[in-house]
Image (cartoon, rainbow, N blue to C red):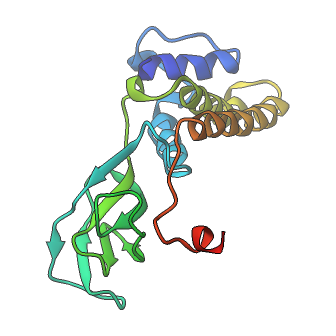
Amino acid sequence: MDKLSVINAALMKCGLPLSASLQDVDWGASTRFDDVSEQLLRAHPWNFATAYATPGQIEAPAHGYRYAYTLPDDCLRVIDVRPAEDLRAPQARFSVVGNLLFTNATPCNLRYVRRMTDPSGWTPDFADAVATRIAAEIAPLSAQSFGLGASLLQLAQLAFQQAQASDAGERRELLPLGSPYIEAR
């Protein structure tokens, strides 16, 4: 799967002719690609887009936290912060301001959703959700019928939910040791 394949899927959903190259793409589909894919990546902690980092500490703690860290350049959304690499360790409180992360955790082990502009690493469900959302956005510009855009927007929401459901089936997180849920049992 590549960028042109996703864009052509969007064009096909609108009933528009397919493009032979990214330079031939019409109706704004190519310009919407990055924005739509970034929006959908931020909307869920996708397994295929999850990355781990231990960001470098900077000297500007604020906002009631002891430490400040610079987020990785490809960070779209912070999933969680832990003082240990073990995912069973308790999560730390944090706040994101711009490209800085404030927390009391040291070291800072960060799990985040990364920017992925190359669809070859996406799941097929996610690629379909992006294509359908692009189609919903360009349909009013290209279609004779305004109703096509509204219908495609509903399909885009369904495609996104299907991609989320498939993604959720590929993850099993353990509850932290000593969690209130386990203690209550």
Which residue sits at x=50%, y=27%? 123
Q: What count of labels does the image hold?
A: 0
Decide: is 124 above or below 167.
above
Q: Position of residue 56 (x, y in %)?
A: 16, 66
Decide: is 53 above or below 107.
above
In the displayed structure, does residue 115 sit left or right of residue 150?
Answer: left
Q: Position of residue 122 (x, y in %)?
A: 45, 29
Q: Position of residue 11 (x, y in %)?
A: 61, 19
In the displayed structure, does residue 151 sit left or right of residue 106?
Answer: right
Which residue sits at x=80%, y=37%? 150
Q: Of residues 2 and 7, which is closer to you in this image?
A: 2
In the displayed structure, does residue 17 sit left or right of residue 50?
Answer: right
In which image quadrant can residue 169 be found? Answer: top right
Q: Quadrant of the N terminus?
A: top left
Decide: is 103 above or below 51.
below
Q: Of residues 5 and 137, which is closer to you in this image?
A: 5
In which image quadrant can residue 82 be found? Answer: bottom left
Q: Quadrant of the C terminus?
A: bottom right
